[in-house]
Amino acid sequence: MLSFIGTALIAILVFGFIIFAHELGHYLAARWAGITISEFAIGMGPILWSWTDKLGIRYSLRLLPIGGFLAMEGEEEDSADPNAYNNAPPMKRMVVIGAGALVNLLCGFLILLILANTTLVGLTTVAAFDDPEQPSAQILRQGDEILRINDRRVYVASDVSWQLFRTYDGVVQFTVRRDGRVMDLPLVNFKLVDQGDGFKSIHIDFIPYGKYLTLGESFGYTAKWALSLMRQVWGSAAEIFTGRIPMTQISGPVGVASAIGAASRVGMNSLLMMTAFISINIGLMNLLPLPMLDGGKLILIFLEGLLGFKLGERVENAINLAGFAFLMLVMAYVTLNDLMRLL
């Protein structure tokens, strides 16, 4: 029971931080754009605590830790206020909408930068093998710097694991730098491990070198690390839509909270890594061109700027309602999957 409560509290703190960062991005951009703000809220449902500043902006903490919002005048319906959201130029509205995701990406980068300066980070150079009889040990050598996997460039250790994970037949072509020479190696046939639901992935049987970075090195490494995680997010989304990754592999809030709890039990570095990944994930997912998400709103504003007129409140409301219904169905499905895995 205590373990469950601890996991729940840690998950709430992590989600709360990510939600706060996202809404703070919207808030700062709205203040910059001169848009009238009604409320800055963390959580949903009944208000637990609130405070109103001299500008009339209410800052509130709400009961349900499942989201947050920035309420702007003229966002839901047209307002005559000259400083209302609906009266702001399209470019300013796009900045306000996109700022939340941008701050999530920035937070993920800063957390990774902290980890790159304080921990042993993974390179793409082979350090050791689990077993000299394993498939990769017959082809790779200690000291090989992996440059490409199946002709896709890799820069950091997470690139290596991701490219191997998405090689579903287990057959891998490595391009390495060995003794100063770049060379393509013979194909490696990795063992496949069943992940459940018929989904199989490669068993990675070698270990990369780790390195403590200088402050100067850490910035370049962190940029590559962050881009690697972004590639994983977009790549996973694409492969879910194409059916290469089954829907049963998707985790919702329950599964993510469970993963956060597991990461926290490993240690602070693992928890920070999980937080960075979720922050980057949420930032990118919010930019998907789907109604109710920031990406969908950006598309509508772009169309308005392109056409020279708004689609109309009724049309936008219908699009948002359809998007909301779709997202709720997906959320219900992935939450049910999470619960089935836990039972």
Image (cartoon, grey):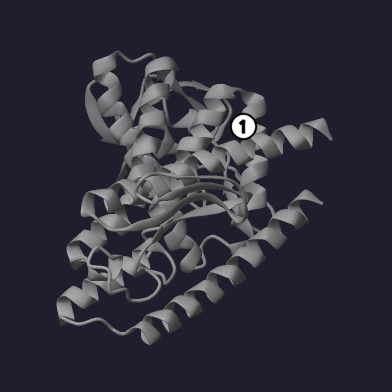
In terms of depth relative to the viewer, which is nearer, 334 or 203?
334
Q: Residue 14 location, x and y as percent? A: 55, 38
User: Can residue 232 be seen in this snapshot?
Assistant: no
Q: Is 215 drawn above or below residue 30 in the view shown?
A: above
Answer with left or right where residue 191 lies relative to residue 127: right
Above or below: residue 323 compared with residue 63: below
Give whichever of 94, 205 is nearer the camera.
94
257 or 22, which lies in front? 22
The residue indicated by pointer 1 is 263
Q: Nearer the viewer, residue 138 or 226?
A: 226
Picture quarter with the N terminus: top right
Q: Residue at x 18, y 62 (%)?
A: 91
Residue 112: horizontal and vertical position, in percent? 40, 29
Vertical position of residue 314 compared to residue 180: above or below: below
Task: Specify the quadrant of the image occupied by residue 289.
Answer: bottom left
Q: Residue at x 64, y 25 (%)?
A: 266
Query: Is the residue 1 above or below the residue 239 in the image?
Result: above
Q: Dot 1 lies on which element?
A: helix
The residue at the far right in this view is 1
In this rendering, would 4 be left or right of 303?
Answer: right
Q: Amino acid at mark 1?
A: Ala
Q: Position of residue 229 (x, y in %)?
A: 40, 42
